[in-house]
Image (cartoon, rainbow, N blue to C red):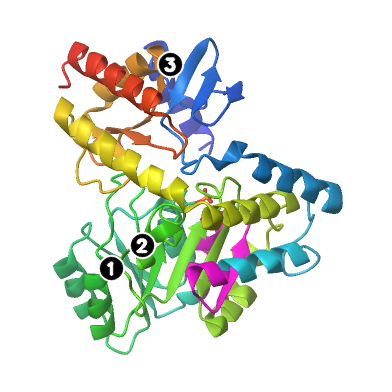
Amino acid sequence: MDVFMKCGEYTTADEVREAGLYPYFKPLTNNEGTEAVIGDHHLIMIGSNNYLGLTVHPKVRQAAMEAIERFGTSCTGSRFLNGTLELHLELERRLAEFMGREATLVFSTGYQVNLGVIGAIVGRGDYVITDKEDHASIIDGCRLSYGTMKRYPHNDLEGLDRVLASLPEEAGKLVVVDGLFSMGGDIAPLPDLIPICRKYEARLMVDDAHSVGVLGGGRGTVAEFGITEGVDLVMGTFSKSFASLGGFIAGDAGVIDYIQHHARSLIFSASIPPANAAAAMAALEIMIAEPERIQRLIEIGAYMRKEYRQLGFNIGETQSPIIPIIIGDDMTTLRVWKALFDAGVYTNPVISPGVPAGLQLLRTSYMATHTDEQLDRVLDTFAKVGQALGVI
Ligand SMILES: Cc1ncc(COP(=O)(O)O)c(C=O)c1O
């Protein structure tokens, strides 16, 4: 049988294209942060993870340009060999200080952090336990590891306890959760997870991709809860609040040193380019120097949640500036997406199998740099489209 046969048989994308509802891979011709242009559509952007609006900040741009001038455009090699610059080490030192951890290690993407860390830590005979709504990169990290993966229902503490209780006492165990869930915008109950992990001697890793720069004064969910012990590893990414590309893992120095020598996605891939490392460092400096940005983002999140609820939209359990608009079926979700797009609002439709059937949604997320006027235009558009299509 031809291994390409499945490609010819795949018709879903064409069907959606023919219906005029295809929402993916649309090229932006201009991107000012809160506003973007796609074709002849001028859009308010509420589909980006640029939470602090720093991708267009003059200091971040300047830092990236200076790094290119000094180091060139690429490291053309792995961190392990020729691809480590003093810039990477400086970034790791500053991140460790910011996150209140002994050490950090910078990877080329957040996706690679999860692949590399889980793959390095979870060995043969070990178990890795995940929340059912964990990000795909965590699932892929589990698949790449030599250990056995177990899952528990979303944020279900009894479910986690049951899974851990069923595992051999002597086996190594790593629990991995999103700190702030990327689709639902809700937060993992870390203070309640920690004692359960302790009871079974499981280590806990938190993926704070969406909460570094957003919650806990920018330091993520661990700081949000005021936790000082019990979270062993924290991952973060530069592709969201840090306005760049790359990611990091933070933890005890001995564990980070082990990961550095065993994470395949670090060792067998080229290091984060100088411009991206410098942009992330500049973003970190701004996060520390201008806490009012984070404050504004939190206020925007609270305002939008209140307004969407008042309009009658189902926004689930979100507690953050990630606000899902739950529509409930694939075609209606695409129709609402298209109507919003045509009316000048960019959102991200998430249909099955990306979310379970019945939970198809438009993922909306906000930036500290959105103006009140932009936000009210978004709400006004949602109200009109929601009524016209019978969603509210
Ligand atoms: C929860 C979570 N973890 C990890 C990642 C991967 O991050 P990156 O974009 O840096 O590869 C993402 C990105 O979508 C994410 O949402």
Q: Quadrant of residue 92?
A: bottom right
In terms of sequence position, does the residue under pointer 2 or pointer 1 come before the other?
A: 1
Q: In this rendering, does residue 228 appear at all?
A: yes
> Mark 2 near mark 1, Cβ–Cβ under 8 Å?
yes
Res. 17 mark: 3
Q: Residues within 10 Å of mark 3 (few under 14, many from 20)?
A: few
Q: Locate residue 144, reporting x and y percent.
A: 49, 63
Res. 221 mark: 2
Res. 83 mark: none
Secondary structure beneath label 2: helix
Magenta extent: 96-120
Give the number of the mark in front: 2 or 1.
2
Amino acid on which the number 2 mark rests in the picture: Thr
The residues tagged by marks 3 and 1 sit, at their Cα atoms, a distance apart of 42 Å
Q: Locate residue 112, reporting x and y percent.
A: 56, 58
Dominant secondary-structure state across the stretch colored magenta: helix
Q: Is residue 147 above or below residue 381?
A: below
Q: In this rendering, does residue 354 appear at all?
A: no
Give the number of the mark in front: 2 or 3.
2
